[in-house]
Image: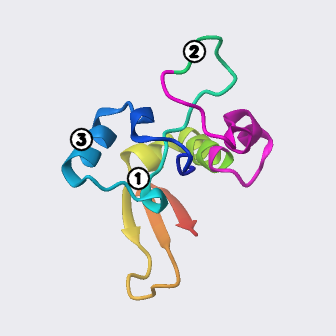
Amino acid sequence: MANMSTTWGIDKLKDLESTNFYNDSRILESGASEEILQHTDFSIVQPWMEVIDDYKEWKAASWVEDLFSVYSYCRSILDLRRGYKDIFVYGFFTLVDPADEQILAYAGRYEDRVALLAR
């Protein structure tokens, strides 16, 4: 997710939550404003909001080929879920070592099947 352009004025914020936030606080700090992910090139209609200046860095199409992108990570998680639906949908999960803050590992169980997830 990218921050919205610092060259935009408040009139470019067309979503209700951002407008309400601005009206409530009267302060819009450029370092804390994130912009929604826009379509940028895969539609022929005029975008309802301005497109960020560096949109090419944030194009979803480029994420498909990048094995370390958020897209690829989510796709691999969904593939894992589809492949082991019994465990990940119907199973029960327990944290392997709750005391260790350096390890995030879960054991998933469903009937006689077990999966260990670690990050």
Would residue 98 appear left or right of 25 to someone viewing this image?
Answer: right
Q: Is residue 56 magenta?
A: yes
Residue 78: image x %, image y %?
56, 42
For the point 53% across and 44% down, which residue is it?
81
Q: Is residue 98 above or below residue 1?
A: below
Within 10 Å of the Cα at label 3, are there few (<14), some (14-19), or many (20+) other Cα atoms?
A: few
For the point 51% across and 41% down, which residue is it?
8
- Picture quadrant of residue 93: bottom left
Residue 61: image x %, image y %?
73, 33
Looking at this rendering, what residue extends furthest in the top direction?
44
Q: Is residue 70 above or below residue 49?
A: below
Quadrant of the image for the C terminus? bottom right
Looking at this rendering, what residue extends furthest in the right direction?
65
Q: Are marks 3 and 1 in contact (CB under 8 Å)?
A: no
Within 10 Å of the Cα at label 1, are there few (<14), some (14-19), or many (20+) other Cα atoms?
A: few
Closer to the chain start, of discs 2 and 3, is 3
Q: Amino acid at mark 2?
A: Gln
Residue that carries the numbered disc 2 in the rendered image: 46
Of residues 102 and 39, the one drawn nearer to the viewer in this rendering: 39
Of circles 1 and 2, which is in front?
2
Distance between mark 3 and mark 1 Cα atoms = 50 Å
Q: Is residue 94 above or below residue 61?
A: below
Within 10 Å of the Cα at label 2, are there few (<14), some (14-19), or many (20+) other Cα atoms?
A: few
Residue that carries the numbered disc 1 in the rendered image: 111
For the point 46% across and 66% down, which residue is it?
107
Residue that carries the numbered disc 3 in the rendered image: 20
For the point 47% across and 57% down, which residue is it?
30
The magenta stretch is: 48-71
Q: Is residue 82 above or below residue 41?
A: below
Distance between mark 1 and mark 2 Cα atoms = 52 Å
Q: Amino acid at mark 1?
A: Glu
Would residue 106 appear left or right of 70 to someone viewing this image?
Answer: left
